Image: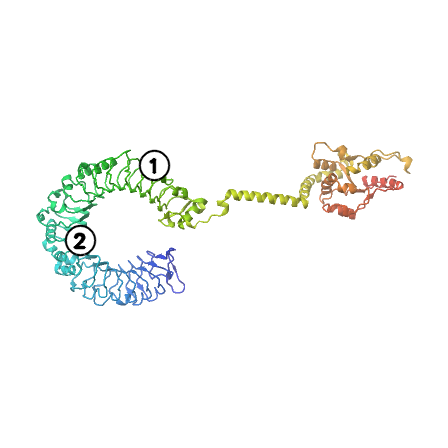
Amino acid sequence: MRSRYSADTGRPSCNRCDRRLSCDCSRGGFTRVPMVTDRALTLDLSFNNITEVTDVDLTGHEQLRALSLHGNRLVVIDPSAFNSLWSLEELDLSDNQLTALDPRWFSKLGALQQLNLLNNPYSCIGSAPVFDGLVRLRRLAFGGPALREIQRGALSGVSQLEELTVHANNLTRYESGALAYVWPLGRVTLSLHGPFLTDRALASSVLADVSYPETPMVLEDLYLIGNESVKPFYETAKRRVRYITFRNLFISDETIVRLLVVVNGVPVISFIVDNVTLTGEGRWERANWTDHRAVDEFVVRNVVVLDVFKFVSFLQLQFLLQYPRKVSVINSKAFVLPCPTSSLLMNLQYFDLSDNLLTDMTLTETLCNGNGTLKDLRVLNVSGNALKSLSTVSRLVTKLRKLTHLDISRTDYSFMPQSCPWPSTLRHLNISGAKLTTVTPCLPTTLEVLDLSNNDLKDFTVALPSLRELHLSGNKFLRLPPGNLFLNLQALTIQSNTLNMFDRSDLQSYKRLSNLQAGQNKFVCSCDFVAFLQSTIKGDGDVQLTDGEESYVCDSPLYLQGEQVGQVHLSVVVCHRVLFVSVSCGVALFVGVLLCILLWRLHAFWYIKMTWAWLKAKHSSRRRQRLRDDPSSDALLTFDAFVSYSERDATWVENFLVPELEEPSEAGENSMNPRPLQPLTLCLHKRDFLPGQWIVDNIMSAMERSRRTVFILSENFVQSDWCRYELDFSHFWLFDGDAGGDPAILILLEPLSKDDIPKRFCKLRKLMSSTTYLEWPQEEERREEFWRSLRNALRGGEEDD
């Protein structure tokens, strides 16, 4: 939003202030003076709809240096509205609706240096000392279409001015001496269209008060037709004004001749005409007897000849053309200046024919085919013409032995030949705004300043050892040109190209470079570039960035696009990626090793293995349950019991358990039961596990195919890695609450408490606390009862009769 309203006062607020505390609130649609920070140094309120400035609108702005209310609808300004603006130096109240000027507005503005009161509908000035007390005032502008009267006290209190502007086209009354109080007066601009037409005495009086020999005078909006219209200039001639400028002039041949007569013998040094309409045919030779040898500069800009086909040659104007050293004919539709006319410019040192209709052929005529006629010419400007051949212009200026500056910019040059003749004195060359795509040795090696801005150049490979300034803005350079080509280069401008970055080594190749302007490029904000540029902005190094840090903006990476390089802060991760990755990997490896050790110590790997086993057990638990519950599936249960034991207890298993259960002796010999015992089938890992199969799968398969599981517990069992590994999986599967299996049969070969069981086997420890287990008796007489109990358990409680 451009503005917002304060809840306290109803006044709008303007937040468009930059870092330099310059607040641009123009064209914001404000009807009242908006609230801005009281630290503002400049405040632009132009082109709004403000009608009144109250006594509190600008309170607190003691630091304000410049205030513009131009182009509003101001009708009322409170007498104390500006009282707090003690530091104000510039005030613009032009183009408003102020019908009278109140001296109280400016009574506290002791620091005011510039005041613009133009184009307000006040009709009189001087009835009160409006500017009294403005002792520092240096630029003053007042008047407008409504101004009718200037009284004697108009400039009372103003001691000296650098510039005075008075718009009085409708002035009807002027008190002599009203503008005569100011001295020194640096420059005066007067618009006196009406007085020059209707009251030439009044115009003469005004001119008399502001005419000083060294004060340049600008006269605007004049219609000079007839001898009478030049009478006011007798005052300027009498006071020997040396610098005269006409702006918006309509004049006839007769008036020109009369004006030349009026200023005859007057040492007019500079004669400038801007926006002039000539009604005659250029027949001014009737004034050829006049003396104008003091004229040093003659400038004609924006000329319109009403009857161009009747306009005669200037060959009769030798009395005017032979003296000036500076001649400018700018934007006047001139297509040729015949060689005989050019030859009349015998003292010419500065020749400006810019923005005309010259071609290669007509320029050849103007410069007399390069025969060196303009022998003293030092500066030639033919920019903005339809020139196409660079070799032609180089040939035409070769014999200009004193030429130092050549401006051939804004032309149609698209090709640069390999070699070109140039005068040895040429030091400054401007070929900007053309269509060049390459640079060749055509360029003179004597150049000190070269401007190739706004072309289509991509590189620069020509050595210019004398060059001090090089301007390459607006081209397509991807990198800075090699510094070893320019041994004496001090200033380089390469803005608005396609530069991605540059570094300290690029600048170090320039031995004497001190000023660089490389902003407004498509910078890739890498860590090295950002660090280098920020140090350069701070003044580190010999090269200064003279176009301001705000010109250096990131184009990529995308997340930095639009950010000023000087404000970018890149993280260590971005700037030291290899180091960061290396350190991160090292830390990750260390943490990984540490974590593995910790997990091993906490038996985490066991829990992981158990989780996998549990998942497999869950998958097959239903199948196992069906096999156990379904009597018809007995054929699929291969073993009566799966035996888990330590290798160190294998002797007992093989010598006692297996013979007793798988190969029972005749019951009649040692038992009261005369019937023979039915043998049982045991699953032993040494005998029945499939070789090459994963141990978990072997254990699971054995358990699925066995009706019972027998654990032979002993100190060897607890300490054996193999048994513990086997027990881990079988324990986890067997004692899972969802497995649906019967409790295991525990046989203790030796006294063993639950505390000897590893704590991670929590269900086994619990089982030992809640379930009766069999103990292998050391006494021979008790062993028969042990075997009977074991067989009973394996057969599900069935007794041997």
Q: Which residue is mark 1?
A: 461
Crowding near pointer 1: few (<14 within 10 Å), some, many (20+)? Answer: few
- Residue 343: which quarter of the image? top left
**Residue type pointed to by label 1:** Thr
Q: In x, y percent, where is residue 127?
A: 21, 67
Report whether 697 appears left or right of 89: right
Whether residue 481 is visible, yes or no, is no
Mark identifier at residue 124: none
Q: Which residue is mark 2?
A: 244
Q: In x, y percent, where is residue 316?
A: 10, 44
- List the single residue furthest toward the top: 691
Q: Camera-side residue: 628 or 54?
A: 54
Element under disc 1: loop
For marks 2 and 1, the one nearer the N-term is: 2
Q: Give above or below for 295 relative to 701.
A: below
Q: In x, y percent, where is residue 399?
A: 20, 37
User: Which quadrant is home to the N terminus?
Assistant: bottom left
**Residue type pointed to by label 2:** Ile
- Residue 524: which quarter of the image? top left
Q: Camera-side residue: 197 or 247?
A: 247
